[in-house]
Amino acid sequence: MEQQIFNGTQEYVASEQLMASVNIAIALKKPLLIKGEPGTGKTMLAEAVAKALGKRLIIWNIKSTTKAQEGLYVYDTIQRLYDGQFGEEGVNDIARYIKLGKLGEAFDSDEQVILLIDEIDKAALEFPNDLLWELDQMEFYINETKRTVKAKHRPIVIITSNAEKELPDAFLRRCIFHYIDFPERELMEEIVRVHFPDVEANLLKNAMDVFYNIRTIRDIRKKPSTSELIDWVNALQIGGIPADKIRKELPFVGVVVKKDEDLELVRQNPLN
């Protein structure tokens, strides 16, 4: 198979280090584990890789109640019981009641896909280890039908984590790891201009000055993210706010600062 190279997209500005990590993970056929504070584009990375490589994206959103088994398959015993009570045909065909999960769907796909396991750290501590064998071997066994589902094409696996809890060492050893640093001003300006190429330079400068100043305020509970800066710049443009009023009046600051106590801190700290 021809080597696939990710070079970012017009909509997703990636650093050289991030692009290198994606391409190393693809070349080594290992999951790519992405960490970084909320709003740094972890989930959007999978969307960008799928678009750049022309592949379908399968998203497995992880919750606190998610079990590894759900990603492989579920046996819908309730539906089978219901069908049996109402005399439906084929009720003895157990395969009809086996529903593949997101990981199973990725394995069973006729074409290579991008599989995003999003926010893996939300699940219970044993969750990552429960997937080790399947991610290593790219197959799993369905007990009810005695069938082995083996990946037709090894999916490109991207896993995100907000670092809410530590992941097991055995799991980490099997991944390529990359931490997305919060963008410096130069990269941030490039990101904003992807969304608003015609934004007035002085407006963007003042908005970014305030934005980065807010992020440095001591004791702030929720630092504003990239997506919140983009929304704020949009609001400032829509509102027709002059650039010289941004620092003085903090128009639409609720787009950037989302907690009452943080808003109070911002008002107490000079932003010049």
Image (cartoon, grey):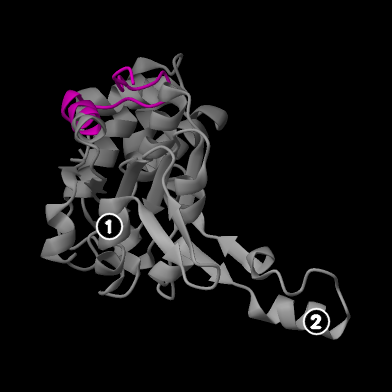
What residue is at 48 percent from the left and 72 percent from the top?
Answer: 143
Residue named by callout 1: 162
Is residue 65 positioned above or below 150 on the image? below
What residue is at 28 percent from the left and 29 percent from the top?
Answer: 188
Residue named by callout 2: 84
* Position of residue 268 measured from the top left corner of the image (x, y, whole percent): 24, 57
Q: Is 117 situated left or right of 186 in this image?
A: right
Say whether disc 1 or disc 2 marks the residue closer to the N-terminus.
2
Q: Which residues are magenta?
A: 1-23
Q: What's the magenta bit mostly, secondary-structure-wise?
A: loop
Q: Quadrant of the C terminus?
A: top left
Magenta residue check for 12: yes
Which quarter of the figure has residue 10? top left
- Is residue 250 at least partly visible in the picture? no
Is residue 123 positioned above or below 222 on the image? below
Q: Is 216 situated left or right of 44 in this image?
A: left
The three-letter code of the residue at mark 2 reads Gly
Is residue 82 positioned above or below 60 on the image? below
Magenta residue check for 242: no
Is residue 35 positioned above or below 24 on the image? below
Residue 100 or residue 235, whichever sits in front: 100
* Position of residue 127 measured from the top left corner of the image (x, y, whole percent): 31, 70
Tell me, yes or no, whether the two marked residues, 1 and 2, touch with CB atoms within 8 Å.
no
For the residues carrying marks 1 and 2, which lies nearer the camera in this image? 2
Q: Quadrant of the N terminus?
A: top left
What residue is at 21 percent from the left and 41 percent from the top?
Answer: 180
* Position of residue 249 measured from the top left corner of the image (x, y, whole percent): 39, 42
Residue 170 or residue 224, whichever sits in front: 170
The three-letter code of the residue at mark 1 reads Asn
Kindly state the secondary structure of the residue where label 2 is placed: helix
Which quarter of the figure has residue 145? bottom right
